[in-house]
Amino acid sequence: MRLFYQQKTIGKKSRKLQKFAFTIEEPVYTLKDLLLQLVTQEVQNFNEKALDTPLHIYLTEELLEDAVHHGKIHFGEKKNATVQSLEQAKSTVIQAFEDELFLVVQNEEHLNSLTTPLTIQEDDVFTFIKLTMLAGRIW
């Protein structure tokens, strides 16, 4: 089943959210199941990208123009070539949700419990909102 996710960090100037497609293969009954599947896919993609870095990196005119448009020119190399632990990532996402460091919204509905049963349909959009701690004094 194809789903979409989008991310938003409070305070960032970007108003338009970009949707990223992902697929789920195992049955998803709760928000916890969904988060664990999404984290598993993202960690696998991250670790595969670390292995797929070409030995000779060069910029074509098209890549250079695209990079100038985004405001950052780089060769796409990763500074950290370590492989990430899947188990650590899973425990981190569950702990972060329990600590209310991010919110999850399915289409227009706020999901506030890891154990709430989910009804998922094709092309549903899940929005992850990263909350930012405030610095300073209140009084």
Image (spheres, rainbow, N blue to C red):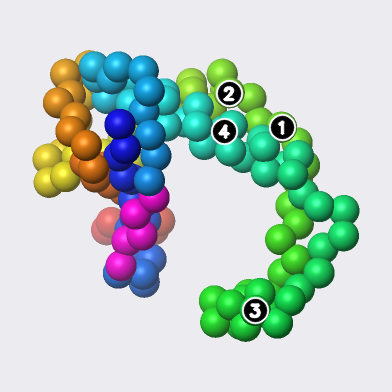
Q: CA distance from mark 4 to mark 2?
A: 6 Å
Which residue extends farthest left?
Answer: 109
Q: CA distance from mark 3 to mark 2?
A: 35 Å
- Whether the residues at callouts 3 and 2 have beta carbons within 8 Å, the answer is no
| Position of residue 112 in the picture relative to residue 80 (left or right) | left
Range shown magenta: 16-20
Q: Residues within 10 Å of mark 2 (few under 14, many from 20)?
A: some
Answer with mark 4 or mark 2, whichever residue precedes in sequence.
Answer: 4
- On residue 43, the disc is 4
- Disc 3 marks a residue whose amino acid type is Glu
Please identify the quarter of the rendering in which residue 32 is found: top left
Circle 1 residue: 83
Of labels 3 and 2, the one closer to you: 3
Q: CA distance from mark 3 to mark 4?
A: 29 Å
| Position of residue 51 in the picture relative to residue 32 (left or right) | right
Q: Residue at x 31, y 37 (%)?
A: 2
Circle 3 residue: 62
Circle 2 residue: 86
Q: Residue at x 56, y 18 (%)?
A: 87
Q: Residue at x 28, y 20 (%)?
A: 28
Q: Is residue 63 above or below residue 34?
A: below
- Is 17 colored magenta in this rendering? yes
For the residue pair 124 and 73, the one nearer the viewer reads as: 124
